[in-house]
Image (cartoon, rainbow, N blue to C red):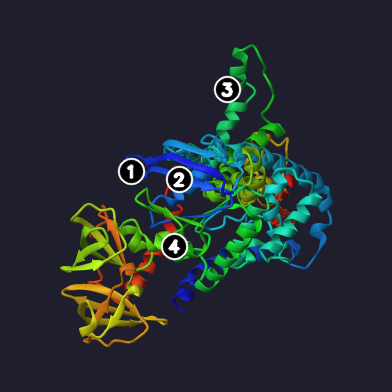
């Protein structure tokens, strides 16, 4: 049933001496919702632009339905794009913006009318036909952009951070809306974002990228539960990442203690990264726990507390629904399926230490992302 | 408060040098030599209708020619690299550093019956042709002098045009021609309109160009007005009346162009 539609083969892209894409290999199935996820400068937008035909790769091939399309200009591809800041034509009203592609391909006027009306209904913008695009809100502009692309019945829709400019509430609504539209129209969506939650919510397949390389490809569940390296573990949700040693299959040692786990296939005594998700850790009285530590900070986050616990100088983030005051001695229990083992990588030791954790942590993160949203369009 | 105070000198300047002269022109236009109110200055305006028509006609031709030269020039210049642009811009601006009259005198000696142009043609066994003291020479002088005012605004609009619109058009299936016709040109209209205004207005009111290159053969509004103030026909009241009518003409022309500026494909009108 899943038919391959687009394949990126050994795609490289460099500007001057800077490697922006480093041997990207990826295939995209028909009717799939695939997300390219990664931080600023990871190459996700460049990848999208190559698929759209706006950028020519330095080396490697792009095939569409088995045909090489490297040299096919954008206007001849059966692909449409929803641009980062929509790029709606300011001199045209909503109707004419949506009708643009149909007019180019000389669709009869009557059919244009019905198709545009139909599409505006899909994006819930009926009655806005005569509005100027600068009179629309961010969310409405974004839906016009989607309608403008989809009305051409492309095989693939590319979306470049389309929700970046919207506020949180609207973003959540639009996420559902996009997913609904994708399923209703049954076409392939290739979606670029830096927002991991967005990626997990909407996608069939998530491609995590960093430094021009694909770090991991998988379903949202795979990516979250079985991160391949410390970068993925840290980028997708919060993770405590520790140094450990595999003693044998299903046995890992960290903090000088052996724990049961579900991983196997490592060399004896192979050093590994151990990932423990903060929500998987169970807090118990000190005498009942495998490890004992002291609470050093607590932040209320609404549905949960972010509790930082000091284990012999190494601080963990634990997410709990119960309140444990600063200074309290606690114990923790780890079940075998709470412990995830990863091979050592270039990213080992760079992430997953909460020693410098502060309440502003999240805000700082958000700020970085906003700036990134600005530059992401200029990655080329 | 501070910004308000800072604007005072400018408001003062405008009042003294813009509003007062305008009021004076209106006052002169509706009075006679004895200072009494009269409409008689407008009585014989129909005598000058031919001059009005001629001015309008030549200014329109000059504007159209400027547009036809400037648009492609500005369009292709906007695609060039920074060095090329700088040099090109310098070459466009260079003549403007010279005195306007001097430039026009230079054209006079080029176009004269035994001037540079006819000598050049003579080398090839052609000509001589009579250009000086014709409408052709006047239009040429207008185009030469006012062309930069057409190029600059069009160039700056095209140059600042967001590349994403072009990409969006390509994305939706438009080839180069379609992209130009449906996106680039309509979006560059504001530049075209301000260029048209900036060429049309000085063209319709010029008197030096027609005097020097037209040699009295093409008598324009500017010449007519000048004659009422400085010339033999000394009559500032009539001159003011004509100037006022020209002002109205220019305002109407500007309104018309602006009106079509809001439409999509209105430039056809120009």
Percent position of residue A269, x then y = 18, 56
Mark 4 in CB contact with mark 1 (< 8 angstroms): no
Q: Chain of mark 2?
A: A
Same chain letter for marks 3 and 1: no
Instruction: Name the residue beneath numbered marker 1.
Output: A18
Q: Earlier in the sequence, mark 2 or mark 1?
A: 1
Residue A26 numbered mark, or none: 2
Percent position of residue A68, x then y = 53, 34
Instruction: Name the residue beneath numbered marker 4.
Output: A221
Foreground residue among A198 and A358? A198
Q: Residues within 10 Å of mark 3 (few under 14, many from 20)?
A: some
Q: Earlier in the sequence, mark 2 or mark 4?
A: 2
Q: Is A320 on the left or on the right of B189, as rendered?
A: left
Foreground residue among B132 and B69? B69
In percent of the image, x 25 and y 73: which residue is there?
Answer: A316
State which quadrant residue A320 falls in: bottom left
Instruction: Name the residue beneath numbered marker 3.
Output: B116
Q: Residues within 10 Å of mark 1 (few under 14, many from 20)?
A: few
Secondary element at image label 3:
helix
Single out the mark in the foreground, 2 or 3.
2
Q: Chain of mark 3?
A: B
Q: Is residue A258 something one can see in this rendering?
A: yes
Q: Earlier in the sequence, mark 4 or mark 1?
A: 1
Q: Is A190 on the left or on the right of A241, as rendered?
A: right
Alpha carbon distance from label 2 to label 3: 69 Å
Percent position of residue B124, x then y = 61, 12
Alpha carbon distance from label 4 to label 1: 33 Å
């Amino acid at each position: 049933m899943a038919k391959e539609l687009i394949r990126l083969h050994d795609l490289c892209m460099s500007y001057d001496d800077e490697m922006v894409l480093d041997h990207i290999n990826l295939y995209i199935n028909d009717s799939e919702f695939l997300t390219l996820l990664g931080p600023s400068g990871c190459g996700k937008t460049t990848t999208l632009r190559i698929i759209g035909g706006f950028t020519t790769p330095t080396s490697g091939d792009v095939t569409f339905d088995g045909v090489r399309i490297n040299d096919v200009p954008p206007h001849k591809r059966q692909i449409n794009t929803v641009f980062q800041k929509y790029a709606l034509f300011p001199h045209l009203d909503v109707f004419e913006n949506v009708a643009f592609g149909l007019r180019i391909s000389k669709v009869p006027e009557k059919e244009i009318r019905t198709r545009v009306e139909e599409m505006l209904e899909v994006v819930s913008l009926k009655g806005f036909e005569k509005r100027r695009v600068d009179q629309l809100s961010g969310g409405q502009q974004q839906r016009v952009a989607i309608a403008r692309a989809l009305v051409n019945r492309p095989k693939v829709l590319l979306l470049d951070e389309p929700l970046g400019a919207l506020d949180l509430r609207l973003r959540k609504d639009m996420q559902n809306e996009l997913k609904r539209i994708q399923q209703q129209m049954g076409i392939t969506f290739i979606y670029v974002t830096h927002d991991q939650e967005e990626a997990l919510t909407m996608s069939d397949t998530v491609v995590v990228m960093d430094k021009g390389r694909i770090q991991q490809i998988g379903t949202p569940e795979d990516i979250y539960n079985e991160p391949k390296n410390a970068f993925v573990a840290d980028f997708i949700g919060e993770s405590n990442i520790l140094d450990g040693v595999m003693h044998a299959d299903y046995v890992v040692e960290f903090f000088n203690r052996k724990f049961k786990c579900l991983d196997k296939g490592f060399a004896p005594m192979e050093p590994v990264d151990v990932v423990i998700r903060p929500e998987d850790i169970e807090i118990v009285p000190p005498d009942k726990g495998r490890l004992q530590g002291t609470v050093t900070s607590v932040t209320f986050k609404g549905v949960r507390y972010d509790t930082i616990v000091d284990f012999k100088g190494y601080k963990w983030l634990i997410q709990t629904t119960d309140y444990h005051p600063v200074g309290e001695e606690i114990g923790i229990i780890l079940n075998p399926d709470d412990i995830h083992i990863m091979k050592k990588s270039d990213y080992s030791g760079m992430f997953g230490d909460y020693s410098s954790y502060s309440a502003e942590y999240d805000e700082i993160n958000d700020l970085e992302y906003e700036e990134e949203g600005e530059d992401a369009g200029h990655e080329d | 408060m501070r910004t308000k105070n800072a604007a005072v000198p400018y408001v003062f300047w405008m009042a003294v040098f813009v509003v007062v002269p305008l009021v004076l022109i209106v006052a002169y236009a509706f009075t006679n030599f004895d200072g009494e109110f009269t409409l008689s200055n407008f009585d014989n305006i129909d005598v000058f209708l031919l001059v009005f028509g001629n001015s309008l006609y030549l200014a329109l031709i000059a504007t159209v020619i400027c547009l036809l030269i400037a648009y492609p020039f500005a369009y292709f210049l906007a695609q060039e690299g920074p060095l090329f642009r700088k040099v090109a811009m310098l070459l466009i601006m260079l003549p403007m550093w010279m005195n306007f009259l001097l430039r026009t005198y230079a054209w006079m000696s080029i176009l004269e019956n035994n001037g540079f142009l006819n000598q050049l043609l003579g080398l090839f066994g052609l000509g001589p042709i009579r250009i000086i003291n014709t409408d052709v020479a006047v239009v040429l002088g207008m185009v030469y002098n006012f062309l930069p005012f057409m190029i600059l605004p069009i160039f700056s609009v095209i140059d600042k045009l967001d590349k994403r619109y072009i990409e969006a058009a390509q994305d939706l299936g438009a080839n180069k021609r379609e992209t130009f016709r449906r996106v680039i040109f309509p979006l560059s209209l504001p530049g075209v309109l301000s260029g048209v205004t900036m060429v049309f207005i000085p063209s319709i009111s010029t008197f030096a160009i027609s005097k020097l290159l037209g040699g009295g053969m093409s008598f324009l509004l500017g010449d007519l007005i000048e004659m009422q103030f400085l010339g033999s026909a000394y009559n500032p009241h009539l001159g003011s009346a004509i100037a006022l009518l020209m002002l109205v003409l220019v305002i109407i022309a500007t309104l018309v162009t602006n009106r079509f500026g809001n439409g999509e494909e209105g430039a056809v009108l120009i």
